Structure formats: C-alpha cells, structure tokens
Image: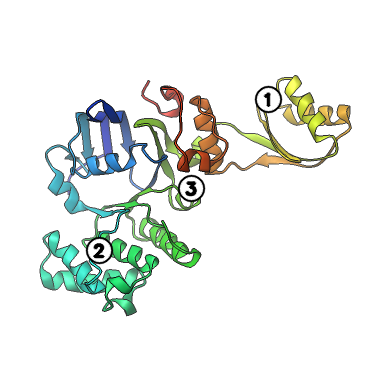
Amino acid sequence: MSDYEYLIHTTDLCKSYGPHMALENLNLKVKKGATGLLGPNGAGKSTFLKTMLGLIQATSGEGQVLGHDIRTEGPAIRSRIGYMPEYDALNPEMEAIYQVKYSGELLGMNPTVAMSRAHEVLQYVGLGEQRYREIGGFSTGMKQATKLACSIIHDPELIIADEPSNGLDSVAREFMINTMQNMVNAGDRSVMMASHLMDDVERVCENMILLHKGKLAAQGKIADLKDIDREIEIHVWGNASKLEEKMLSIGMVVRREGRIMRILHESEDITTKILACAAEVGSQIRRMHEYEASLEDLFIVIMENLGYEIKTSEDLLRSPVHARQVDAPGHMGGGS
C-alpha cells in the first residue's frame, strides 16, 4: 500500500473542453473519512470524479489519489477505488450474483474468489435472497444496491458513490444511507458521496466540497462551515412586520419566514437588542434560541457570499444559476 497523506490531493487542476472550463484551478486536500461532493448540475462534479479515476485527462495541473498520479496511474487508482456511477451500468439480463462476480473479474480477481465475494457483498447490501434474480426485474432500490455491491467486491479503500440514493423510496433510501454510514464507521472505509440530497450528505459525511461553475466554492468540515453565520431564531406574536423593520433599521441582519425570524448573531448583546426592539414596537417573543443551521442554510449563506441570489437549495440545485463570474473568498476555501 502506498504511503499517502491525503485520499485526494489536487494542485491548480483544470479541465477544459474547448473554451469551456469544466474545472478551474481546483486545489483540494481530502482526508480519510466521509466527504460530500456537492454542487448544482454543470458544477463539474462528474468531470471531477472521472478525472480522479483517470478516465479523462486533466488539461493542466496535478492530482494524486491514494498516492497515485491521476495522469499516469489510472489503472492502479481504479484497482483501489470502488466506483458507484449515477447512470445505469447493469445488464438487465444477468442475474445479480453473476453481474457482481463479473465486476470482480474485470478488476483481476480469480473467478472463484470473485464468486465467493459476490455472495458476501450482496448479503451485505441486503440482496442475499434475491441474488439469483435477473436485474431487469429489480426495483430502483435493488439496482442501486447491486451497483454498490459491484463497487465494493474488491474491498476498496475509497468508495466513490455518485447519487447513491437517487430515485429511492424512503425505505430503500434509509437502508442505503445506513449502509454508507456502516462502511465509514464500522468498516473503516472512506467514502466520497456526490449528491443533491443534503440531508443524506449531512448524515453520512463529516466533510464537504462545494463546486460551482467548475470552481471551488467551499471546502472543509461541515460543522465548521456551518459556523460561518450563527443566528438567533425568534417566534414572534403580533406586529411582526414592525419588529422586522425596526431590527433592520438599526443594522441587524434578518431572515424572515412568517412569524419566525432569524437574526445574525453579530454581537454578544444581540438578544438584549432583539428584546428592546420587540418592547418598542409592542411585539411578543414567544420563543428565542440559537438556531441550528442545516446544510441547506450553509448553501444559501455561501452562495450569497459569492454574490448569487439563492433562496432555497432547490433554487441552487435544480435550476440554472445565471450569475456573474466571481471567485470564492479565500476564507471559505477558495483559490483566489
């Protein structure tokens, strides 16, 4: 096993298709554990993953995965990584056991060993009793589980899962997330999980990378990044609009959803100021507490800091973002 400090390490990595920059000056250091790879469609996630696997060549810059050079050691990288693609990569006419066994053989495993491991991993992903069924008759959840089994048959050090819970019902999604958590916690394996379902990322991953328009928008521990902007949440009864106007007039940063408001925790006396404003306009504050930011809140904060008008994660992840070209701030992990 090679000696390496980071699972993935890139320096000024770029990938262009003619004039289009799919990846621009990415400087990443990904440590062992679980990392979420996030970003809207067209952000460069799939290009980044394929470049890390040595499937496409970088235009410029350097990159290492598990200590191997992405330019010259693609086969060595792929032999130590399990890749679960988003797209359908299964033969509907094959029985699951033989599809998984075939994946092992493609990686150079002895057929007997591959068959033995195929039984083990299908049991692990919850398909032990269905392993002799044709994949064409599987539900979406069973197909996703089969793809996961194919990716872990050779016991890889790093599993790259591209949208692993995409299209799953609540039961199958819960099983997939639990399996991912298991691989990281009990199995001591590293996972890079690309997803637009932020709840799933937050449950599985400790770290995250956010790409936008091929650039690095944020990188680091989710818990640390969520501390970018702490807020106080208040539940207001009566004169909510007047209270909002009053707080805004004295320079407070307020986000409002009906009778619930979140005020940026800019100073230690923020609660005293909020209560003074409420008393002045005749509002009752029924509840006040430190707001526990979600990953969705973090997205909104990051994109606002970058100069994008984003209201919800759906705005960010499902709709094209038309915005001016900007650089990520240095304090958020950007390269500029």
**Mark 2: amino acid:** Leu
Q: Earlier in the sequence, mark 1 or mark 2?
A: 2
- The reply to whether discs 1 and 2 touch (Cβ–Cβ < 8 Å) is no
21 shown above or below 67: above
Residue 25 point in image, percent of width and height: 29, 26
Residue 151 point in image, percent of width and height: 26, 59
Q: Nearer the viewer, mark 3 or mark 2?
A: 2
> Residue tagged by mark 3?
198
Q: Nearer the viewer, mark 1 or mark 2?
A: 2
The image's mark for residue 90 is 2
**Whether residue 106 can be seen here:** yes
**Mark 3: amino acid:** Met
> Residue tagged by mark 1?
267
Residue 94 point in image, percent of width and height: 21, 72
Q: Earlier in the sequence, mark 3 or mark 2?
A: 2
Residue 18 point in image, percent of width and height: 22, 28
Q: Nearer the viewer, mark 3 or mark 1?
A: 3
Q: CA distance from mark 1 to mark 2?
A: 55 Å
Pointer 1 local density, CA inside 10 Å: few below 14, some 14–19, many at least 20: few
The image quadrant of residue 178 is bottom left
